[in-house]
């Protein structure tokens, strides 16, 4: 436990640690008139047992009644993912080196522990969740618009992109060239898209330095307005006779 506490105290972001080991040292010194030279874990079983029992009486949260479970508490300045990840990694590496049949070092609970476990679960499921979201968007777009190219807005805020492309495609089906169709669509729904994007971004502008990146909505809006014509050039081409190719029906 001493070694684990030292390892945790060396982790950036850990302010200090405590456990029954630390408290036992203090109680041992108290039994010798507070002499700091006695802030040790005594090799004398009687002295160490007495110190542990006194610790249990004054701080029962640091050891259970059977003396089988004892927590090591790390005090953190925040619960950011990076801080929790460093702590978890340190404990896991320490446990891999020091676990034995008679002792095990386990990641425990507490609010930080629960958040760390949540982060680990989310990270493991992240790619699968993203894949399922993209598949769902593509399938629903295909069902609605009867063409896979509708999904060209995925990744640049699909709702913004569809508002713009829907008008653009309607104009292209009427024989309007791509550049003119995009320009008219931009004047019609583009203004609304820009207004929505800016409004949402302003509402969370104070979060710009927060790890919660909701302000990214403005970049989604910019991406939809800027990338749509570039993607349309490759996916929604115009034939030499002026008719559009690959334009899906509504």
Image: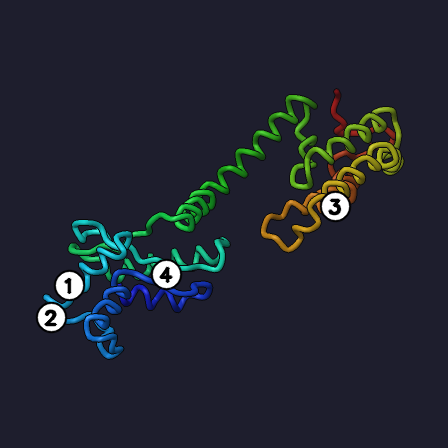
Q: Are marks 4 and 1 in contact (CB under 8 Å)?
A: no
Residue sitting at x 75%, y 21%: 249
Q: Quadrant of residue 99?
A: bottom left
Q: Quadrant of residue 72?
A: bottom left
Res. 226 mark? none
Q: Position of 214 compared to 91: left or right?
A: right
| SS class, disc 4 | helix
Mark 2 sits on what residue? 44
Q: Please state which of residues 160 and 94 is positioned toward the viewer in this rendering.
A: 94
Q: Earlier in the sequence, mark 4 or mark 3?
A: 4
Q: CA distance from mark 1 to mark 3?
A: 62 Å
Q: Position of 175 compared to 134: left or right?
A: right
Q: CA distance from mark 3 to mark 2?
A: 66 Å
Q: Nearer the viewer, mark 4 or mark 1?
A: 1
| SS class, disc 2 | loop
Q: Are marks 2 and 4 in contact (CB under 8 Å)?
A: no
Q: Are marks 4 and 3 in contact (CB under 8 Å)?
A: no
Q: CA distance from mark 4 to mark 1?
A: 32 Å
Q: CA distance from mark 4 to mark 3?
A: 40 Å
């Amino acid at each position: 436990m001493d070694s684990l506490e030292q390892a945790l105290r060396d982790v950036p972001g850990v302010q200090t640690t405590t456990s029954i080991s630390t408290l036992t040292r203090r109680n041992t010194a108290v039994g010798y008139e507070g002499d700091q030279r006695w802030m040790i874990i005594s090799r004398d079983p009687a002295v160490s047992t007495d110190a542990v029992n006194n610790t249990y009486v004054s701080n029962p949260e640091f050891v259970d009644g059977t003396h089988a479970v004892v927590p090591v508490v790390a005090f953190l300045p925040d619960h950011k993912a990076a801080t929790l990840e460093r702590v978890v990694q340190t404990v896991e590496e320490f446990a891999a080196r020091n676990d034995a049949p008679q002792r095990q070092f386990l990641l425990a609970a507490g609010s930080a522990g629960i958040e760390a476990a949540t982060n680990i679960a989310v990270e493991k499921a992240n790619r699968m969740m993203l894949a399922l979201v993209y598949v769902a968007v593509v399938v629903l777009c295909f069902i609605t618009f009867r063409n896979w190219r509708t999904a060209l807005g995925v990744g640049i805020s699909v709702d913004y992109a569809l508002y713009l492309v829907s008008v653009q495609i309607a104009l292209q089906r009427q024989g309007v060239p791509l550049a003119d169709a995009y320009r008219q669509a931009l004047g019609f729904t583009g203004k609304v898209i820009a207004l929505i994007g800016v409004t949402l971004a302003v509402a969370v502008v104070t979060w710009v330095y927060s790890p919660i990146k909701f302000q990214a909505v403005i970049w989604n809006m910019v991406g939809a307005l800027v990338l749509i014509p570039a993607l349309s050039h490759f996916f929604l081409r115009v034939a030499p006779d002026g008719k559009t190719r690959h334009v899906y029906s509504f």
